[in-house]
Amino acid sequence: MKNLYGVVVIYNPENEVIKNIRTYLSYLKKLYVVDNSETMNESCIKNICRLSDKIEYKFLNCNMGIAYPINLVIKKLEKDDWLLTMDQDSYFYRDSFLEYIKILPELKENVYAITPEIIYKNIFDLNNIKKIQLKKSRNVFSLELYFL
């Protein structure tokens, strides 16, 4: 396994998102926070960015949905990198994310996604780790994965 990156797509975030980000941030090489809000919540964003220098924030100034922000991040990654995709309401219960990290190096080359079981409401809801498989064609990346 090369690296594990993360992307969290946020929309009109409140400070509660900080608690959720803390459940996985320490395990990531870098976390991309992509903001789909029309208006930036500057106070909340400052608090998010203060969590770590591993955080890169991008404000889209409009709601582009889930797939667009994830695809922005995928274009920055290498072929063998892993990507954790999260929404602002999702988090990992206690240290359960460690179980996923342990199995990543053991997965075969043809595994493109592992997904957790949803145990309650938004706990693990929409959490996915995807191995990035990119193909360069005329300097344009095309995905070989399905996205939301």
Image: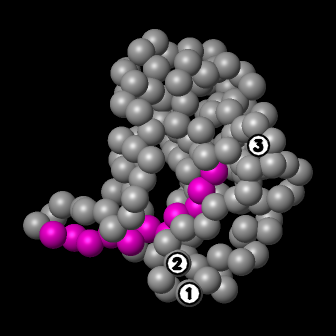
Residue 119 spot, x, y in % from top left: 81, 48
Left or right of residue 26: residue 126: left
Q: Does the residue at mark 3 contact the one at mark 1 (Cβ under 8 Å)?
A: no
* Magenta segment includes 27: no
Point 24% across, 62% down: residue: 141
Looking at the image, which is closer to me, 4 or 29? Answer: 4
Q: Does the residue at mark 2 contact the one at mark 3 (Cβ under 8 Å)?
A: no
Q: Does the residue at mark 2 contact the one at mark 1 (Cβ under 8 Å)?
A: yes
Q: Main secondary structure of the magenta part?
A: strand
- Label at residue 111: 2
In the image, the segment drawn in magenta is 127-137
Nearer the N terminus, badge 3 or badge 1?
1
Residue 116 spot, x, y in % from top left: 70, 59
Q: Quadrant of residue 129?
A: bottom right
Residue furthest out toward the left: 138
Q: Quadrant of the N terminus?
A: bottom right
Point 73% across, 57% down: residue: 117
> Counting other residues with Cα less than 10 Å from the Cα at mark 2, is it few (<14), some (14-19), or many (20 or more)?
few
Q: Amino acid at mark 1?
A: Lys
Which element is circle 1 on?
A: loop
Q: Amino acid at mark 3?
A: Ile
One can see residue 81 in this view: no
Nearer the N terminus, badge 2 or badge 3?
2
> Counting other residues with Cα less than 10 Å from the Cα at mark 3, is it few (<14), some (14-19), or many (20 or more)?
some
- Relative vertical location of residue 45 with respect to residue 72 in this rendering, above or below: above
Residue under pointer 3: 123
Q: Amino acid at mark 2?
A: Val
Residue under pointer 1: 108
* Magenta segment includes 135: yes
- Cα separation, mark 3 vs mark 1, equals 27 Å
